[in-house]
Image (spheres, grey):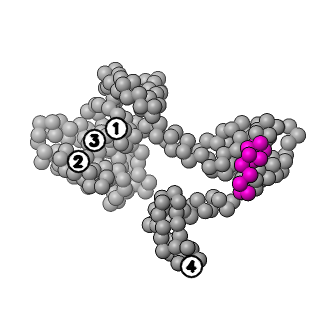
């Protein structure tokens, strides 16, 4: 079909295409897969040291020989070779990523495991009076909650979430992988690269104005609150994120992610949800 009609078949997606294009995303995945197939097995950066008296060439030649057996569809023989390599060198072979490792650890070289580890990690946002021990305990509980959700133990996951809220007043956002203490306190985040640093007196003024703005918002004096928001931006290059309760000194213009999140946080809940829905779609 490919020679006669220029038709390429992709068995993974069960589609065929004249010319070989299956869309941008599919083409990128296909190119990555072909590149992976064409390269030899490599040693993982997370591998332990080789056993005494064993050289890199000793292991690599055995791994390459097994790879050739797999390519020739000699699967039974390749399995025997794989087991022998494990027995002799304590080397585990990962066929999906075409890597080998003494001890069997692949870390972030394994994209599946790397993504799983990334999903376990929740970023703290905003302020709140917590000790270092409290923060470490919360992070540990979030990891346990993630593990419970992964095995569909939703009751345990919900219990952990309720405990975090009841004990630490913590809100968890699974969509953004973030957590924060539900508090009216605003906290300064790292100054944006290229932005002008404020003096200690200016920081004190900014913090007092942010507190004043929060009081005005609670009393529904929105025009006065907006005036303070504009003053902070125009005078001190400070943007405020009302959702995460954070403020940041930004470079001129403020077009980064924090600026976008800050602008979104100051819209009505209805408009926020509408924009988030449009982004998801």
Q: Residues within 10 Å of mark 1 (few under 14, many from 20)?
A: few
**Label 2: which secondary element:** helix
The residue wearing badge 1 is 173
Of the numbered discs in the image, which one, if any, rests on residue 4? 4
Of the numbered discs in the image, which one, if any, rests on residue 273? 2
**Label 1: which secondary element:** strand
* Of the image marks 3 and 4, the number of the one nearer the N terminus: 4
**Label 4: which secondary element:** helix
Magenta run includes residue 197: no
Q: Position of residue 164 (x, y in %)?
A: 36, 25
Residue 13 higher or lower than 160, as above or below: below
Of the numbered discs in the image, which one, if any, rests on residue 13? none
Q: Position of residue 137 (x, y in %)?
A: 45, 24
**Label 3: which secondary element:** loop
Segment tinted magenta in the rendering: 71-82
Magenta run includes residue 76: yes
* Of the image marks 2 and 1, the number of the one nearer the N terminus: 1
Residue 208 higher or lower than 68, as above or below: above
The residue wearing badge 3 is 243
Q: Residue at x 47, y 63 (%)?
A: 15
Residue contact between numbered discs 1 and 4, judged by CB atoms under 8 Å:
no
Q: Is residue 141 left or right of residue 43?
A: left
């Amino acid at each position: 079909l490919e020679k006669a009609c220029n038709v390429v078949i992709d068995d993974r997606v069960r589609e065929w295409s004249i010319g070989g294009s299956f869309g941008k995303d599919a083409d990128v995945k296909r190119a990555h897969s072909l590149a992976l197939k064409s390269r030899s097995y490599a040693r993982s950066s997370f591998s332990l040291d080789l056993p005494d008296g064993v050289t890199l060439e000793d292991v690599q030649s055995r791994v390459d020989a097994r790879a050739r057996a797999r390519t020739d569809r000699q699967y039974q023989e390749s399995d025997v070779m794989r087991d022998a390599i494990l027995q002799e060198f304590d080397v585990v072979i990962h066929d999906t990523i075409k890597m080998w490792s003494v001890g069997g650890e692949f870390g972030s070289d394994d994209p599946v495991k790397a993504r799983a580890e990334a999903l376990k990690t929740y970023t703290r946002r905003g302020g709140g009076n917590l000790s270092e021990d409290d923060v470490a305990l919360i992070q540990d509980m979030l990891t346990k909650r993630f593990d419970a959700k992964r095995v569909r133990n939703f009751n345990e996951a919900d219990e952990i979430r309720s405990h975090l809220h009841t004990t630490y007043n913590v809100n968890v956002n699974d969509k953004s992988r973030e957590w924060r203490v539900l508090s009216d306190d605003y906290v300064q985040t790292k100054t944006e690269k290229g932005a002008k640093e404020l003096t200690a007196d200016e920081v004190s003024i900014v913090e007092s104005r942010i507190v004043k703005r929060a009081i005005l918002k609670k009393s529904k004096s929105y025009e006065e609150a907006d005036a303070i928001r504009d003053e902070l931006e125009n005078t001190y290059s400070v943007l405020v994120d009302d959702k995460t309760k954070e403020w940041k000194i930004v470079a001129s213009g403020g077009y980064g992610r924090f600026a976008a999140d800050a602008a979104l946080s100051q819209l009505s809940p209805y408009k926020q949800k509408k924009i988030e829905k449009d982004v998801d779609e």
